[in-house]
């Protein structure tokens, strides 16, 4: 039984190849990018859910204060696990988007259409 392909498994595969200094052919770059394009929607959805949780946490914190202190709320939010997960997911989405851009460029260069 094969495991489900996820953006995490694709990125981990590529990371291992790069760490081992293995040359990645253009077809592999395009295949990985194509799969990541399909999976990007799930990652963005997770990002939006985390963004909403962070916003709800901020509102909850502000509502619990007698005198609203936005800068204190921001500092407390940024120290939370929810914010950490949000930022990690934001970075992951950015990494996927950048990988897709690089893959397109590599494909153009390898085909001589650059």
Image (cartoon, rainbow, N blue to C red):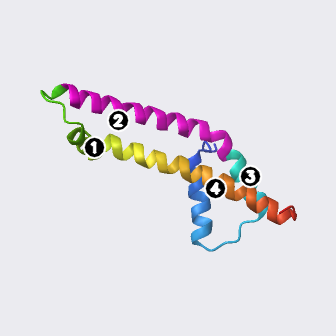
Task: Give the mark nearest the N terminus, 3 or 2.
Answer: 3
Question: Which element carries disc 3, helix, strand or loop?
Answer: helix
Residues at discs 2 and 1 in contact (Cβ within 8 Å): yes
Q: Position of residue 36 (x, y in %)?
A: 65, 46
Nearer the observer, disc 3 or disc 1?
Answer: 1
What crowding class fits label 1: few (fewer than 14 Cα within 10 Å), some (14-19), or many (20 or more)? few
Q: Secondary structure at mark 4?
A: helix
Give the distance between the C-alpha atoms of the residues marked 2 and 1, in whole angstroms.
9 Å
Occupied quadrant, residue 108:
bottom right
Q: Which mark is residue 98?
A: none
Quadrant location, the N terminus: top right
Residue 54's label in the rendered image is 2
| Residue pointed to by mark 1 | 80
Q: CA distance from mark 4 to mark 1?
A: 29 Å
Neighbours of disc 4 within 10 Å: few (<14), some (14-19), many (20+): some
* Start-end of magenta stretch: 36-63
> Residue 99 — which label?
4
């Amino acid at each position: 039984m094969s495991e489900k392909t996820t953006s995490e498994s694709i990125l981990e595969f590529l990371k291992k190849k790069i760490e081992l200094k293995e040359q990645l052919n253009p077809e592999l770059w395009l295949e990985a990018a194509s799969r990541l394009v399909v999976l990007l929607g799930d990652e963005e959805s997770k990002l939006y859910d985390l963004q909403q949780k962070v916003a709800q946490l901020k509102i909850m914190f502000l509502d619990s204060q007698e005198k609203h202190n936005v800068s204190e709320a921001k500092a407390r939010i940024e120290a939370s696990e929810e914010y950490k997960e949000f930022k990690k997911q934001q970075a992951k989405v950015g990494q996927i988007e950048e990988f897709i851009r690089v893959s397109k460029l590599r494909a153009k260069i390898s085909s001589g259409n650059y």
